[in-house]
Image: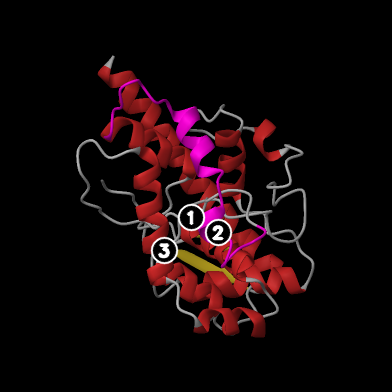
């Protein structure tokens, strides 16, 4: 069973159902109900409403007939093996609970795949929190759509306008809980943010590898954003042209 970094509880439930069919049949909704039992993490995150963020992304070997509850327990136990006791102290020094750190780590996880870049992304998050600027992280809109069972692969205006407390464009602060599974590197970035004055970032279209440019000023950000939007429109035009040629 492989759970990639950044998988949500909805992705995990779907994969468990696919990999471990049961008799009688167990569906995704039933697995998601199991994921709402937070007994296993009460010692780390008593305020957590579900196990989102605490099912560790990794590859697991389990018996073919493993029960969903056993699979979930194995993933949570792996998270608890990764979580270091000293991280509780680091969280406290940042003025954050472990649950808030895991939540911030999940934002970092979904925003950057590069380990060297993650502490810089963390710095942007903390800088915005300190300045009371909404985080504006689009992956929270994706998470809202998945929660409401309407994710179609595209972020729509309705997602960005959602009144869900997970909407980081509309509301300040961090979301109520994690939005994905988190790796050790994302947790470490959340606990050890770089020291910067950055409050913006945009995809690096020159590299086109998922890395980012970081900005401290709104003017520089707007120039980077405009370049990104030109690149995005070019990509869309090429896609439309390819589709037209294939037809």
Q: Residue at (30%, 57%) from the top-left corner?
A: 58
Residue 206, percent from left and from top: 39, 60
- Quarter location, residue 221: bottom right
Who comes first in sequence, dot 3 or dot 2?
Answer: 3
- Most foreground residue, 228 or 196: 196
Q: Distance between the Cα atoms at labels 3 and 2?
A: 17 Å
Residue 247, percent from left and from top: 29, 14
Local SS, label 1: helix
Pair 3/1: label in front: 3
Residue 206 visible within the image: no
Q: Main secondary structure of the magenta part?
A: loop
Say above or below: 78 vs 122: above
Who comes first in sequence, dot 3 or dot 1?
Answer: 3
* Range covered by the magenta-colored residues: 20-47
Q: Which residue is mark 3?
A: 79
Q: In the image, 25: left or right of 31?
A: left
Residue 71, percent from left and from top: 34, 46
Assess whether mark 1 and mark 2 are in contact (beta carbons under 8 angstroms).
yes
Assess whether mark 1 and mark 3 are in contact (beta carbons under 8 angstroms).
no
Residue 38 among magenta residues = yes
Local SS, label 2: helix
Residue 190 visible within the image: yes
Identity of the residue furthest to the top in this view: 247
- Quarter location, residue 20: top left
Local SS, label 3: helix
Q: Distance between the Cα atoms at labels 2 and 1?
A: 5 Å
Pair 3/2: label in front: 3
Q: Which residue is mark 1?
A: 110
Q: Distance between the Cα atoms at labels 3 and 1?
A: 18 Å
Q: Which residue is mark 2?
A: 107
Disc 3 residue crowd, few under 14, some 14–19, many 20+, Cα 10 Å: many
Q: In the image, 34: left or right of 62?
A: right
């Amino acid at each position: 069973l492989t759970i990639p970094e950044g998988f949500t509880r909805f992705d995990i439930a779907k994969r468990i159902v696919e990999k471990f069919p049961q008799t009688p049949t167990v569906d995704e909704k039933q697995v998601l109900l199991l994921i709402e039992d937070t007994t296993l993490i009460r010692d780390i995150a008593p305020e957590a409403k579900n196990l989102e963020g605490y099912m560790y992304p990794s590859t697991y070997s389990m018996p073919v007939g493993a029960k969903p509850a056993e699979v979930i327990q194995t993933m949570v136990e792996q998270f608890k093996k990764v979580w270091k006791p000293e991280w509780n102290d680091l969280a406290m020094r940042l003025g954050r609970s472990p649950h808030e750190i895991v939540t911030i780590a999940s934002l970092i996880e979904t925003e950057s795949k590069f380990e060297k870049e993650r502490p810089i992304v963390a710095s942007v998050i903390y800088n915005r929190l300190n300045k009371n600027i909404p985080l504006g992280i689009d992956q929270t809109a994706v998470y809202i759509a998945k929660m409401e069972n309407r994710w179609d692969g595209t972020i729509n205006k309705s997602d960005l306008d959602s009144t869900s407390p997970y909407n980081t464009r509309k509301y300040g602060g961090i979301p109520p809980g994690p939005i994905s599974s988190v790796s050790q590197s994302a947790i470490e970035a959340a606990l050890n943010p770089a020291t910067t004055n950055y409050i913006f970032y945009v995809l690096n279209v020159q590299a086109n590898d998922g890395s980012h440019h970081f900005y401290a000023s709104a003017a520089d950000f707007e120039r980077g954003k405009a370049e990104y939007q030109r690149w995005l429109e070019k990509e869309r035009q090429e896609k439309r042209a390819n589709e037209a040629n294939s037809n």
